[in-house]
Amino acid sequence: MEITGITIGGFKNIDLVTLEFPEQISALIGFNNYGKSNLLTGIAFGLQFIKESSEERRLMMHSQVNAPLRESLLNKPFVFALKFYYNSQHWHYSYSWHWRDSQISSEVLSRDNVVIHNRKQDTQVVPNLSLLIDKQNSSLAEVYQWLKSISTFGIDLLHNVTSGSVICQSANLSLAAAVYRLQTEDLSNFQLLTEAYCSLLPEIEWIKAINKDDNYSLQAKEKYIKDPTPFEYLSMGSRRLLALLFLAIKAESHQVLVFEEVETCLHPRLIPLLLISLSRLAKGSRIIITSHSPYLIQHLPLKSIYIATPQVAGVAGFKTINPALQNKLLLQAQELDISLGVYLFDLLIESLHEPELLKEWL
């Protein structure tokens, strides 16, 4: 199964945004407070809702923190949808409900544009906070089980990572304990992790986890330094990089990784190698990143870059460059002898004063 798109709406300052995934990595770019983090949080929220019990779903539906605050969005329902590819068929699953309500108002599953289940039309009574995909004895049990297994990784990742930072929320494992488990129980993936880490940080020869009476720590061997270096002595970027790479491995296949500003981890010249490493380690998972770096953006295909649209009344939106205009934009950047990333960020800056300059490309 392969996730091909996600839609989120009626969440914080998000009206309705659809992300398509033509490639493994997609990027969100825009100014601060334009909704990038809210969009990532909304995706995690939507996927978590599917997994929860009826009582937890009720609590989520009454969350004041995540409900829309913008006046124009106050009556908007929460909307979440997934598009995916399975058994050579295109599937679409969606649900919606109104904030501070206790009833799911819509739930639809379709296959190749043919509706299989429609909550509004289904003759079987479904409890208010149960989902169709909660069913155990169904011919579509494999699809339901997969939908409920999708998780987001990286949403809670801090910039200041330490050995003790909790990296696996479900198991309450620190980074050091998680790496130690990988090191002792999954040597092949541990080797992939250390190879990727040391290739991105050539001054580090190895990294390993230590367990002393259930007190876990991390050490690294730096070139030209005789003794191992405690993990906390490494730079903030070096520490966060290990967490990023570990999460990419931990996600396994068909999950969703969300990372903010990965460019803060290392030198700009190594960003292409970081993107390659994340793709290789994450296998079939989708990776969504936010970025303020023109240098990072220039290494992604234009069709995978979502630009924050000029806000109206504080409402956030994200769109790609119109496919019919993408070659034209690339040609203009080439004629100006600047990178794609610089050109896109220049458009963003100009849109602060003249929003139409950006809108005509979207």
Image (cartoon, rainbow, N blue to C red):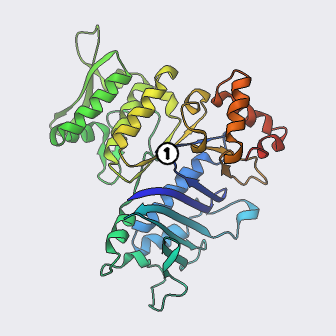
Answer yes or no: is residue 250 visible.
yes
Q: Quadrant of residue 205?
A: top left
Q: Position of residue 73 (x, y in %)?
A: 71, 64
The local crowd at label 1, few if under 14, some if 14 to 19, many if 20 or more residues have their Cα within 10 Å, is: few
Q: Give the residue displayed 25% in from the left and 40% down from the top.
A: 177
In the rendered image of this protein, does residue 295 appear above or below residue 168?
above
Answer yes or no: is residue 244 visible.
no
Q: Give the residue displayed 55% in from the left and 57% down from the top.
A: 42
Secondary structure type for disc 1: loop
Q: Position of residue 129 (x, y in %)?
A: 47, 79
Answer with left or right where residue 349 lies relative to residue 238.
right
Q: Give the residue displayed 59% in from the left and 44% down from the top.
A: 303
Foreground pick, 295 / 264: 295
Check disc 1 and report the residue beneath it.
23
Q: Position of residue 296 (x, y in %)?
A: 55, 30
Tally the numbered discs.
Answer: 1
Q: Give the residue displayed 29% in from the left and 11% down from the top.
A: 223
Q: Quadrant of the N terminus?
A: bottom left
Q: Residue furthest top?
A: 224
Q: Position of residue 350 (x, y in %)?
A: 79, 34
Answer with left or right where residue 187 lies relative to residue 261.
left
Q: Amino acid at mark 1?
A: Glu
Foreground pick, 127 / 1: 1
Answer with left or right where residue 181 lies relative to residue 151.
left
